[in-house]
Image: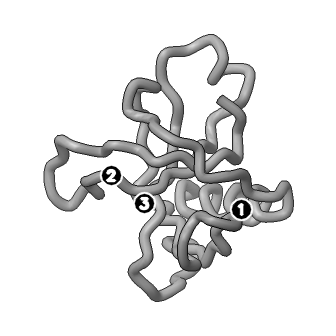
């Protein structure tokens, strides 16, 4: 379970305003922890625009992964690995740096 991998993730059941259904999710937790723990931390991905710094970041989906979408920073969520399904692809280290900056801005006081 490598950091920066996009999976199809089953996010049901949920409670509003949580993101639900089967949707792409980007693994942002540390790769080493992902190996050892039964859970990973993901950011859901939505096709709903617009980009709003630092809440939503535009993301060019990997080839074959569908249309360009948005990483939803407030949707950060720990999920069981059993919720992860097919791999869609990987994001670049440049994209991960931008996401890290947005998460840091979102969580900072």
Q: Position of residue 103 (x, y in %)?
A: 60, 57
Image side of residue 19 versus residue 2, left or right:
left
Disc ID at residue 74:
3
48 and 30: which is toward the camera: 48
Q: Is residue 86 above or below residue 53?
A: above
- Which residue in the structure is indicated by mark 1? 101
SS for tag 1? helix
**Dot 2 alpha-carbon crowd within 10 angstroms: few under 14, some 14 to 19, many 20 or more:** some
Q: Position of residue 11 (x, y in %)?
A: 30, 45
- How far apart are labels 3 and 1 at the CA level? 13 Å
- How far apart are labels 2 and 3 at the CA level? 18 Å
Disc ID at residue 22:
2
- How far apart are labels 2 and 1 at the CA level? 26 Å
Looking at the image, is mark 2 or mark 1 earlier in the sequence? 2
Whether the residues at callouts 2 and 3 have beta carbons within 8 Å, the answer is: no
Q: Position of residue 57 (x, y in %)?
A: 59, 74
| Residue at the bottom extreme of this rendering | 50
Quadrant in the picture for residue 1: top right
**Dot 1 alpha-carbon crowd within 10 angstroms: few under 14, some 14 to 19, many 20 or more:** few
């Amino acid at each position: 379970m490598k950091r920066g991998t996009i999976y199809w993730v089953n996010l049901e059941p949920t409670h509003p305003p949580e993101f639900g259904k089967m949707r792409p999710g980007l693994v942002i937790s540390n790769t080493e922890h992902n190996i050892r723990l039964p859970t990973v931390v993901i950011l859901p991905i939505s096709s709903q625009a617009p980009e709003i710094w630092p809440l939503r970041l535009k993301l060019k989906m990997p080839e074959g992964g569908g249309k360009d979408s948005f990483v939803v920073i407030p949707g950060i969520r720990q999920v069981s690995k059993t919720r992860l399904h097919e791999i869609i692809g990987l994001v670049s280290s440049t994209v991960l740096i931008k996401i890290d900056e947005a998460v840091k801005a979102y969580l900072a006081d």
